[in-house]
Image (cartoon, grey):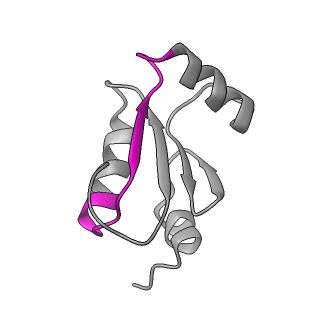
Amino acid sequence: MFGKSEHKVTIYTTPNCSVCRKAKEYLAGKGIAFEEIDVAADRRAADEMVQKSGQMGVPVIIADGVMLVGFNQFKLDVALKIKK
């Protein structure tokens, strides 16, 4: 778990994913805690991610119950009710 916040954020990632890295940097920069799950290292987690999202690409971000496939800063801000 990284950071501190009142939000519940889970991000499914792989080690070499540059978009995943951008999403994690954005969340950390906003001080938003997140749980990172490396689907390359955990087959069960990868299966769970596919079951939840319907696809195999990363990142998959679940932010306060809202699922986002990929990293879209605007959509993440809306899901977490982040004001600019």
Which of the 4 quarters of the picture holds residue 16? top left
* Nearer the observer, 41 or 75: 41
73 or 10: which is nearer to us?
10
Q: Is residue 21 above or below residue 29?
A: above
Query: What residue is shown at x 36% (from left), y 70% (from top)?
Result: 5
**Residue positioned 52% across, 71% down in the render:** 80
Marks counted in the figure total 0
**38 in magenta:** yes
Question: Is 29 a magenta residue?
Answer: yes
Q: Residue at x 32, y 59 (%)?
A: 26
> What span is in magenta?
27-42
**Position in image of residue 68 (x %, y %):** 61, 51
**Residue at left 71%, top 37%?**
52
Viewer-proximal residue among 66 and 70: 66
Judge whether 21 appears above or below 77 on screen.
Answer: above
Which of the image's four quarters has the C terminus?
A: bottom left
Q: Position of residue 82 (x, y in %)?
A: 46, 79
The x and y percentages for residue 81 are: 53, 79
- 82 on left or right of 51: left
Q: Residue furthest bottom?
A: 83
Residue 29, image x, y percentages: 24, 64
* Residue 3 vertical position relative to residue 24 in the rendered view, above or below: below
